[in-house]
Image (cartoon, grey):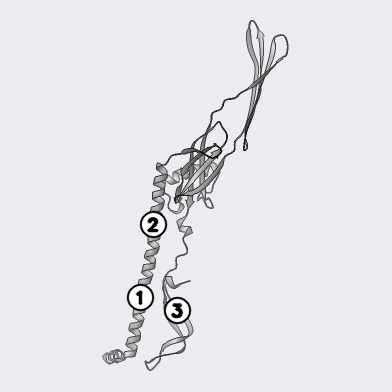
Amino acid sequence: MKDKIKNILSNKSLVTFVAGALLCLLFLKQCNSIENLKQDVKLAQEDAGRQLNNFKAAQDSVTILRNDNGDQLAQIRSFEFDLSNLESSQAKLTKKYKKALALNDDLKEVNSLISANLEITDSLDVTTTTETIDTTTTKVTFASSEDFGDGNSRNLTGFSTFKYEFEQFKVLETKFELTQTLSLMAAIENVDGADRLKLSTSYPGLVIKDIENINLVNSRLNRKDQKKSRWLVGFGVGYGINLNNNQVISTGPSIGVGLYWSPKFLQF
């Protein structure tokens, strides 16, 4: 046994070949470790950036501006939730959207969740006409119509019937019908590296009290399939450097079955 080991070690060509192969394996393993580290750093940076953005979004409040037309323009910083790693508070927040919009439980194919809290404060200039029904009964008709443009309008119609008897007025019947059309325009714009929800309207009596936008991502699904380093057994035909039976390294064609190690950064 010792003689065989001595014979192997005395064969400089074989020792050189084995040493070279080991160095190549060690080099490939080191490259593979660096590739894994780069991927881990990238994912950690994405998660840290998401956490920082959500912290800033939680501190942000609605900013009310005016666009070039003088219309109300509200904007606020967007949240970003990772569906593969939802925190308890985030899960509670998305629950109300699921219920209101009849969304699937895992929010599959949902990109954003958007809500707005609006308040309408209005004053009307009403035109009135009177109609005498009989000696004691009068009908008063109300009407008001406004077209604010851009799909915003308000129409009010109604009447009240009064009867005067026993020296006092008595309301017999009152009906009103109010029809409003409200036009809202919204966009999500990336400003200085952060998404912001913008909402605008030209309806004069509408006040934007609060708005919210939650961008949804799934880091687990969005990651490319992770290639893994692995050992392979295969049949090969090629041309290259060979070690023949006489333990001599030469170049030439080769055919054989071998055991291979494939680092993931060399896979494509």
What's the amino acid at mark 3? Val
10 Å crowding of disc 3: few (<14), some (14-19), many (20+): few
Residue 129 x/y as whole percent: 68, 18
Q: Residue furthest right?
A: 134
What's the amino acid at mark 2? Gln
Q: In the rendering, which numbered label is found on residue 233? A: 3
Which quadrant is home to the N terminus?
bottom left
- Cβ–Cβ below 8 Å for labels 3 and 2? no
What's the amino acid at mark 1? Phe
Q: Which residue is mark 1?
A: 27
Q: Which residue is mark 2?
A: 45
Mark closer to the chain start, 3 or 1: 1
Secondary structure at numbered mark 3: strand
Horizontal side of 266 relative to 179 (left or right) equals left
Q: Nearer the viewer, mark 3 or mark 2?
A: 2
Mark closer to the chain start, 1 or 2: 1
Residue 195 x/y as whole percent: 47, 48
At x 47% / y 55%, what residue is drawn? 218
10 Å crowding of disc 2: few (<14), some (14-19), many (20+): few
User: How far apart are the alpha carbons under marks 1 and 2?
Assistant: 27 Å
191 versus 232 height, above or below: above
Closer-to-camera residue (201/103) = 201
